[in-house]
Image: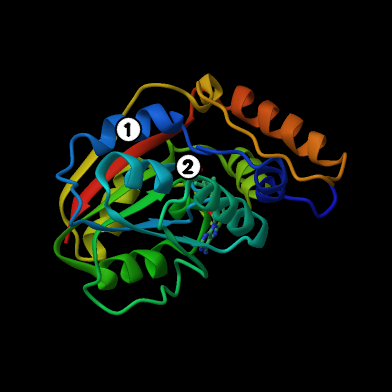
Amino acid sequence: MGSLTYFDFLAKFGVGGAHPGGILLTQDILSKEKINDQSVILDAGCGTGQTAAYLYQQYRASVIGLEINPIMVEKAKDRFEKLQFPISLIKGSIEEIPFADHTFDFILSESVLAFVNKPKALKEFYRVLKKGGRLIANEMTINRPINQLEAAEIMNFYSVDSLLLEEDWRLLLQEAGFHNIEIKAYNLPLSHGNQTPEFNFSKDFEPELFHVLNEHGNIVIKYQDVLSYRVLTVSK
Ligand SMILES: C[S@@+](CC[C@H](N)C(=O)[O-])C[C@H]1O[C@@H](n2cnc3c(N)ncnc32)[C@H](O)[C@@H]1O
């Protein structure tokens, strides 16, 4: 697949709701939180901005999207402009969040944390959350330990530095200082897919990206009993 990555595929295909369960699971999770028009929310790694737009539309919250990929930033910007939603968009990394301490009531990380330096990003999430603020994450999780060869194949495809079990997430969240740690499994393998796909294709995309898509399909099928995700909700 050359140097093209899974994220190149997501960006050029403009995949919205690029996390397990898609926007429907997002809506369900958010409905359990006390979000209102006074809430200040960071959508960390917002992708094309589907969830950020929903947060404004549904709650009239103050929403800020933070995203590292320039193509994603453009597509999120287009979305917010078309909808005329006053959502701020910042190009930057969740490993170094360009905001002051105690800024946000909520941080959302929908399939982003798993792909970065996790302790570093969690430290940043903790820093920029207000006291009592909530982190809501939907992240890749393995259901049981796997052997090195299998782990290497998955880690190589997603360019991740580790694959975490539920208890690994719990430990990391504790170490970052969070409490009220709840970890929920939805019992759907990644191969179940996103029931509400949305695309915003770039005009020019490399045909090799279809190989990445294909390879992704192969990975989720091959590891369907082990490669899954958890919804992590915690408080500062
Ligand atoms: C699997 S996608 C999920 C996008 C979005 N949260 C969603 O659910 O549709 C992961 C996103 O995280 C972004 N990302 C990866 N590393 C990042 C970082 N260090 N800081 C900010 N965004 C990052 C990628 O560019 C990509 O848009």
Mark with earlier residue (1, 2): 1
- Sort mark 2 into few (<14), some (14-19) or many (20+) by Cα contacts within 10 Å: some
Residue drawn where x is 46% and y is 46% of the image: 111
Q: At which x and y percent is residue 4?
A: 78, 51
Residue drawn where x is 47% and y is 23% of the image: 189
**Eyeballing the image, is 182 above or below 175?**
above
Q: Nearer the viewer, residue 144 or 214?
A: 214
Position of 97 compared to 148: left or right?
Answer: left
Cα distance between the residues tagged 1 and 2:
11 Å
Position of 61 compared to 32: left or right?
Answer: right
Residue drawn where x is 35% and y is 76% of the image: 99
Q: Colour mode? A: rainbow
Q: Nearer the viewer, residue 53 or 208?
A: 53
**Eyeballing the image, is 89 above or below 136?**
below
Point out which mark residue 50 bears: 2
Is disc 1 placed on a helix, strand or loop? helix
Residue drawn where x is 46% and y is 31% of the image: 22
- Sort mark 1 into few (<14), some (14-19) or many (20+) by Cα contacts within 10 Å: some
In the image, the residue with mark 1 has its CB under 8 Å from the nearest atom of ligand 1: no
Q: At which x and y percent is residue 183?
A: 25, 39
In the image, the residue with mark 2 has its CB under 8 Å from the nearest atom of ligand 1: yes
Q: At which x and y percent is residue 121?
A: 40, 66
Please give the residue where the numbered disc 1 appears in the rendered image: 27
Q: Label 1 sits on what residue type?
A: Gln
**Eyeballing the image, is 14 above or below 21?**
below
Look at the image and tell me in which quarter the N terminus lies: top right
Q: Label 2 sits on what residue type?
A: Gln
